[in-house]
Image (cartoon, helix red, strand yellow):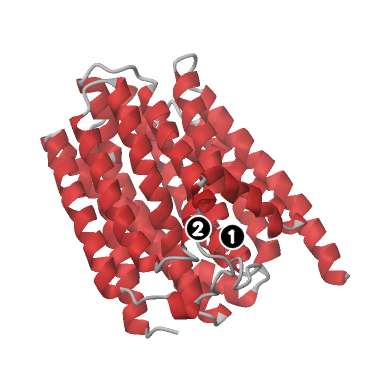
Amino acid sequence: MVSKKRMYLHIAMVGLYIMCGNFAHPITPTLIVERGLDSSMFGVAMAGMLVTNFLFAPLWGNLCSYMPTRRIMSICAIGYAVGQTIFGLAINEAMIIGARMLSGVFAAGIFTAYSNYVINVTPDPIERNKYLTTMLTVQTVGSAVGYFIGGFLGVISIAAAVVPQVVIATASGVLHSIVCVDDTPYKHKPEQPLRLKDANPFSAFAAAKEFTTPLLALIFIVVAVAGIGQTSYEQCFNYVIKDQFGLSSAYNGTFKAIIAVLTVVVNSTVCLWMQKKTDINITFLPVFASGAALLGAALVFRGSLLPFAGIYIVYNAVNALRGPIIQSMVAGRATPENSNRLIGFYQAMNSLGGIFGALFAGLIYEANPAYPFILAFVAFAIATLVGVVYVRTYKKTEKA
């Protein structure tokens, strides 16, 4: 087990990368409008990124068993910077989609590696959950701070947001190789050497049947379906405040800054209490039900700015609980032999939901701006119902 100092330095580097990774998100609607691109691009480009994220997350999870995880962090941070450089220079739809797909390949690896590193070097489940919660809190806060900074940089120009993003992402890749230890001694060594077929993303999916149980399958369904709702809502909120309310990217950044503060409060109190004092395999359900209720309210009040923005902020504060709790549920069912692949598959399920959420949001927005919000509400309602099935199955399993 690594020292607390090194672990928190790793988490700080995670926050740095996540922060810069979000500089470009609030300026994406501006880039689309200024360069005269099709409005569906706000969803289609994100879907392209999530497609490669979905395909490559299990592969990176597999590679985490063979390579030092810190090396994967470094490679992926620098690779992401290359993708975002192309994104900032994009002048047509093909360039935007291609850039986002390239970024998605490496984003899949870095998020998979972040969680796997913590799990590999922290065998104690209590400490592991604490670090995972702290890291995911930092990710949420870093995302919000990145939106805030990127929103104000975007008022200056698109380049003012993209150039710092590329520089900081590259620097974070270098810093990870310095700050993090080689986790090879801490993890299970595969019986077979790395083979060419292990580089096939689809073979990693086929291998999922080796570790997926009925309860894990239900968790993955919940993750994927909720991902549809989350991404559809997030993408459309960002576009609506520009398209329908005429607000600049600075407003989006301000909303995210408020969310960052609330996330720290919620995850440092409610989330840790839930993990320590309750059975999260049961208490995760009210979190999803609350998310569905808030998305229903957003649909009702989407035509009025103040309640629409207020619901968005409250929803994100509640939703901040979802990531740490679900990831702890997944990690709690992992073994040393399958933990790297399991987290890779978990990231893939997140991306799978995001693909449909982003793509449908972009395509159906033109037909009716209300449709993406209906999709978000329905998806979270379905995820909640699947969660009910999970809780019932879990209780029966525990009694047996």
Q: In this view, does 33 lie above or below 62?
A: above
Judge from the rendering whether residue 103 lies leftward or rightward of residue 357; answer left or right: left
Mark 1 closeness class: few <14, some 14–19, many ≥20 residues within 10 Å: many
Amino acid tagged 2: Gly
Q: In this view, does 246 lie above or below 204?
A: above
Residue designated by label 2? 61
Q: Which mark is residue 329?
A: none
Label 2 sits on a secondary structure element that is: helix
- Image quarter hosting the C terminus: bottom right
Report the residue at 25% width, 52% height from top: 20
Number of residue marks: 2
Amino acid tagged 1: Leu
Q: Kindly indicate whether the residue at mark 1 contacts the one at mark 2 (C-beta within 8 angstroms).
A: yes
Judge from the rendering whether residue 8 lies leftward or rightward of residue 315; answer left or right: left
Q: Nearer the viewer, residue 90 or 197?
A: 197
Residue designated by label 1? 342
| Most distant residue in the top direction | 367
Residue 196 % position (x, y) = 49, 51
Q: Measure how far apart labels 2 and 1 are at the Cα level.
A: 7 Å
Which is nearer the N-term, disc 2 or disc 1? 2
- Image quarter hosting the N terminus: bottom left
Report the residue at 64% width, 59% height from top: 284
Residue 171 % position (x, y) = 19, 59
Q: Can the viewer see residue 289 in this picture?
A: no
